[in-house]
Image: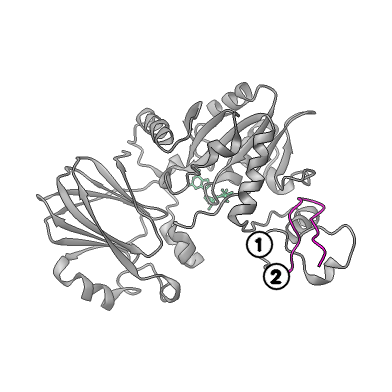
Amino acid sequence: MEVRYCDGCGARLQSEDPNASGYVPTSALQQEDVICKRCFRLKHYNEVQSVEYSDDDYLTMIQEIHKTKGLVVKIVDIFDFNGSFISSLQRLTGDNPIILIGNKVDLLPKSTKRNKLIQWMKKTAADLGLKVQDAFLVSATTGEGFDQVETVIEDMRNEQDVYVVGCTNVGKSTFINQLINRTSGIEDAITTSYFPGTTLGFIQIPLDDQTALYDTPGVVNRSQLVHYVTDKDVKKITPKKEIKPKVFQLEEQQTLFLGGFGRFDFEKGLQQSFICYFSNELYIHRTKMSNADEFYHKHVGELLQPPTEKTLETLPPLVKQDIKIPLEKTDIVIPGLGWITIAEGGVTVSVHVPKGVQISIRKALI
Ligand code: GDP
């Protein structure tokens, strides 16, 4: 069959997978000048549909930035920093300057020291191989931090284009809408934006006669828990307001269940505090390690929930990882769920998470 491309975004047209890029129903393929379903909805209903790009499609699209000049604004979810970081970005975007935006700062406890966190973001970005010109904290929903970011973008873009990049769910659309709303007064610009006239598949929002802000497609990060749970459970595990950390004094051989999504065993070490940063709606249950296996099988989906029964049908089984924590103030992060700060170090713990979810360890964020 002849290979055809969408007249709107340039994606390769296909009729097999409605959730992937370039989808058109077979009947529409007979016509000339075909556009994909996503472009169709954007053009006729001003509606942005998220489609899943394969990693290859995504990399090809982002690499287009390499050939152009402009400022790259990289958004990460501060609640899930490593999980939402695209470490290959430097290679993909060439010499263009990058600024790093940590979004959703409204979720962190009010006492969080903003400057310390910004330093932490810069250092972590550098450790992950990304050179950033500067880093900022914002809340795309409340508008916190936008006065500064708006000015910085305007100064740093040097009358050139702006490319906003980030994983799905980091709040990229909310960020762009907030930015546009503040500069032009237009609400929800992204859903009423100009039809993309480029072959990059990027949504284009004009900044002036010559330049534009581009919303690039979000890459999907498979190590996040959200890919294994129902929408209802995603709502429960995604914090919506300021997190209230919960502190547990644990002795060795005690276990914390993080709903039914994770299990934290304090294997060995002196009694100390463990600070849990999770959605306020996630029920944390303490029990003895010796009966934790049995407890989980008996209560998952009921006392230990979320997950609901429905999510349990698709949730991969929990797998255990042993971790030695030599240093004080260390975070164990479960991407998409939250993290536990270990106060004193010199301990051995084990963490059980659904297979496929990759935990990370870092110097305490707060
Ligand atoms: P995108 O996939 O990166 O475009 O992300 P969206 O803009 O669709 O946002 C993903 C989710 O995060 C939505 O549920 C938003 O309401 C939420 N969100 C976005 N920005 C913020 C923020 O600053 N604070 C909080 N608490 N939630 C946010």
- Our reading of the magenta stretch's main secondary structure is loop
4 or 161, nearer to the observer: 4
Residue shown at 42% from the left, 54% from the top: 336
Q: Quadrant of residue 350?
A: bottom left
**Quadrant including the C terminus:** top left
Mark 1 lies on residue: 20
State yes or no: residue 95 in magenta. Answer: no
State yes or no: residue 6 in magenta. Answer: yes
Q: Secondary structure at mark 2?
A: loop
Where residue 301 sits in the image (x, y, percent)? 35, 74
Q: Is residue 3 above or below residue 240?
A: below
Residue shown at 31% from the left, 42% from the top: 362
Mark 2 lies on residue: 16
Decide if residue 150 is on the left or right side of residue 185: left
Decide if residue 274 is on the left or right side of residue 205: left
Residue shown at 50% from the left, 34% from the top: 100
- Residue type highlighted by circle 2: Glu
- Residue type highlighted by circle 1: Ala
Where residue 174 sits in the image (x, y, percent)? 59, 45
Q: Is mark 1 within 8 Å of ligand 1?
A: no
Q: Furthest residue to the front? A: 1
Where residue 225 sits in the image (x, y, percent)? 43, 60
Mark-to-mark CA distance, 1 and 2: 9 Å
**Quadrant including the N terminus:** bottom right
* Residue range (magenta): 1-15
153 or 89, nearer to the observer: 89
Q: Quick check: marks 1 and 2 in contact, CB under 8 Å? A: yes
Q: Furthest residue to the left? A: 270
Q: Quadrant of residue 185?
A: top right
Q: Is residue 275 above or below residue 299?
A: above
